[in-house]
Each structure stands twice: as C-alpha cells, then as structure tokens.
Amino acid sequence: MVKRLLYFRTVVTFFVVALTVMLSGCQLTPQTEQAPQTAAIAPVEPQPEIAPEPPEPTLEELYLWHHLRAGFALSEQSHPSIDKERTRYLRHKDVLAEIDERAGDYLAIIMAELESNELPLEIAMLPFVESGFDPYAYSHGGAVGLWQFMPATGKRFGLTNTWWFDGRRDIYLSTQAAIDYLQYLNKMFDGDWMLALAAYNSGEGRVKRAIRKNKRRGKATDFFSLSLPAETRAYVPRLLAITDIIRNAEQYKMALPERPNESNLVAIDVGNQIELAIVAELAGISLKQLADLNPGYNRWATAPTPSNVVLVPQQSQEKLQAGLAELPPEQRVSWQRYEIRNGDSLERIAKKHHTTVDVLMTANNLSNHLIRAGRHLMIPLGDEARLPPLRMDQQQPVKYQVQSGDSLWLIARSFNVKHQDIARWNGLSSNVLRPGQKLTVYTNEPQKQTRTVRYKVRNGDSLSLIAKRFDVSVNSLKRWNDLKSDFLKAGQSLKIQVQLTRS
C-alpha cells in the first residue's frame, strides 16, 4: 500500500514538472516570434477637431439702417395726423435714400450715442424732422443746427456759442446735449416719449400747461388730446410717420439703404487752440473734409480753451494723435507780433487783422482796453486767406455790404453759393442781417465790379422794364432810389448799379 502511494506521488510529480516546462516554452516562443509585429504597429494619432462654421451675419449686423430699425422701441401709433404726414413722405419714392445722403456719416455717430444712453433709435430721425440733417439750418426763431437748439437751451445744456465756436452746429456735442435734454424731458413726463418730444419742440412749460388745462376739464392728457401749437401737432406725427416707413419699408415697396453698419468717425480731443489746417495735415485729410465734419468751428482755428473736440475719419485717429503728441506747443497756432502805434485802439487793431477785441484781450492777457504805443500785441494770423475752413480752393474773397431788404438766401443766390457757407465764413449764429454789415463771400464765379449810372425815365417805362433792361431786380431799383411805390414819371432820374464782369 505504501509502495503504491509512493509510486502515485512520483507519477504526479513527473507530470507537474513536465507540464510546467511545456507552459514555460509556450510563453517564450511567441514573444520571440511576435516582437517584430508589435514594433510595426504605428501609434494612433488624435483627429483634429473641426470648428463649426460661423453663422451668416444678419441684416442688422451688416447694414446701418437695418440696425436702426431693430432698435425702434416706441409703440406704434395710429392717428389721422400720422397718416397725413406718411402720405406726404411716400410721394417721394426716394425719401429714405435722400435721408441717407443727407445724414451721411452723422447717422452712425447719433445712433451710437443714443444706444449708449439706452434711448429709442427712432430719435435718430429727429434731426431729419428738425433740420433735414443740415448743421447750418436756421429757424426764424433763432434755433440752430441739426437738433435746432435755441441759444438759451443750448447754453443750458453746455453748448457754447462764441466768436470761435458754436456748439449747436457741432455734430458730436449737440447730439450729446440733445440726448441730455430728451432724457430730462422724458423723466419730467413720466416716461411718455410723445409728450417729451412735444416738449422738445414747443417747450416743457407749454406742454405742462396744456396737461393742466385738460385735467381741469376732465379730458385725456395724451399727446393727441392736448391743445398745442400747429407746428408741434405736426412735429411728433412727422417723426412717427417717417419711422413707420422705415419699420415697414417692404410693405411700402421701399428698400432700406445699404449703408455699412459701422461708424467711420471718431471724436478726438486735440487739446488747446490749434489751427484747423494743422489738424487736417496731421490727420492726413483735406481741410474741406475736416470742415465738413466739424461745422461748429467758425474760424481758422479751434477756440483758445484747454479742450477742443474734432471728428475725423477712424483711419486718421492714430496718425492724428501721434502727430499731436510730437507737435511743439509754439507751432499749434501762427502768431504775428504787432507793435502798437500812436492812435491805435484794440477795436482798430482787431478790425485790421480780422479778429475781435475779446480775442486780442484773451491772447494778450489784458484786463482792460488800455494799450500803449511802442508795446507789442500777439495777434493770431487769421487773415482772409485762412479764415474760412471751408472751400479754401476757391478764388480770393469778395467783400459784400448788406443792403436793406437783403437776406442770406438772396445774397447766396446772387453769388451762386450756399447760404450755409456764407454763415460759416462769417461766423453767423443767426440768419438776421443788418444794413451796412460787411460779409466775406468766397465764390468761383467771375468777380464783378459795380458802376453807378444815371437813367432818365421815359414815357412808357416801368420799374419791371427798367430792371429787365439792366439785369437787376425791382427791389434793388427801389432800394437804390429810396422809392416807396412802383410809380414813375417821365424825366425822373434813377441810380442803377451796373455790374461789370471782370474775368
């Protein structure tokens, strides 16, 4: 029994050893054979992620007028007065294109300021209703600029009006002032934009009185229920009418202008007084372009104040700022050193050098009008060649003396120029002229000399026949001869100013 057990253990041990050897051989052999195959397998590289294509830009992102429409926030109104104004606008199929041409780069500036102050973008069309986007627009009441600020209201909201500068005509500053005024009015009338706009046109006092009157009578106090001046009753509907056309342009079979949705202008503070010609040179633009963008400046230079803001094309910003940083202070304005002579006065010196007494006093730190012969004054070189920052490429200036009955429009027509240009060239802040006033006019028309001739009235003559014969106006004939009526008698002698063309 014992022998059998030993035999069995021996056999089992043999098989265990043999099995172990076989298994060890199986492990060694595959490693040797498969090693080349393992080395030949290339590592798997991660696949690059494919970025999703950016979405197509929307019309609001591409075009300024679509952006404008997307920012409309006033509730739509229905009223016969709006219908009337809308019908009037729709008679002109190109009305939106005309507005776009008038507004030009101004529109983007206005929209940006409105958006930054969270105002409805319908208000961007207010300058169209007010002035047709004309910064030189004047009203009979004395309102000036895109936003038609009266002198007192402009001053109240920080717009200065000096010999050098009229803030009411400045695009950037007048827009900021208009926004401040509109926000003030909107708050006054508890968020009612219709009443705020009415007050912008006719004054807050008038609108408040109309509201109180309706309350006493138990009537509604919304805009259309108030008794307001005819101008104001048409003013608000005009804004609502033109914005309705923009909002529903497709319905009226009109296309919104495809002006790119970007602002091409930037406001730069050029610091203290500097000649506009130097600013234009540093910015790399023409003087005329600079003047068109900055209609607030009346003279050849900015005001003698620590801060002066100009609008320039965005691509000129870096060049202008770099140039200003390198410009020596003494080269910002050209000056003339003038020796005071016996008999001189500040008034006489100012007139001789086409400047004002205030400018001389400021430039020379004078506290009174007393000057002494032998001493010197510093006078800015604002002569006629530099005076108008607009139309510098035209001929030498023509001096014109205002006659009784003249108006800016009539004078501009006679010289074939714009009345806005005459206002700019002469620093006028209103369209009121006085007889004897001297104006400087720049024109491409041949200059004319005038000779006064005598004409004896014949039988059958009339003022209209004589005027036609000498190519003058009836009003001029009456003015030259102090005639109170159209009645003439044979043998009467008339003075006629005949213009002799000089090429």
Image (cartoon, helix red, strand yellow):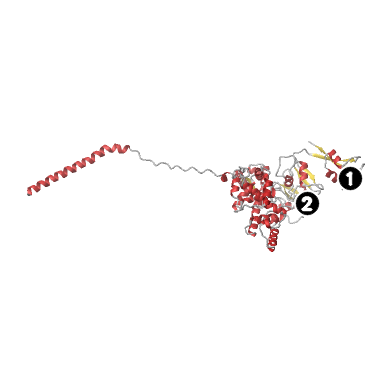
- Asked which secondary structure carries label 1, the reply is loop
Q: Amino acid at mark 1?
A: Phe
Q: Amino acid at mark 2?
A: Glu
Q: Nearer the viewer, mark 2 or mark 1?
A: 1
Q: Residue furthest top?
A: 503
> Which image quarter is the C terminus in?
top right
Residue 347 visible? The answer is yes
Percent of width and height locating residue 396? 75, 40
Q: Secondary structure at mark 2?
A: helix
Of residues 460 and 376, which is closer to you in this image?
460
Q: Label 2 to label 1, Cα distance in Å? A: 44 Å
- Closer to us: 139 or 153: 139
Identify whether 381 is placed above or below 217.
Answer: above
Q: Position of residue 41 (x, y in %)?
A: 33, 38
Of the image marks 2 and 1, the number of the one nearer the N terminus: 2
Q: Position of residue 184 (x, y in %)?
A: 64, 57
State left or right for residue 173 relative to residue 353: left
Q: From the viewer's perspective, tell me whether residue 319 is left or right of residue 17.
A: right
> Which residue in the protein does label 2 denote?
347
Report the residue at 35% width, 38% height from top.
Answer: 42
Number of residues whose C-alpha sits closer than 10 Å to that of mark 2, classed few (under 14), some (14–19) or many (20 or more): some
Q: Residues within 10 Å of mark 1 (few under 14, many from 20)?
A: few
- Residue marked by disc 1: 487
> For the point 18% across and 43% down, which residue is it?
19
Q: Which mark is residue 426?
A: none
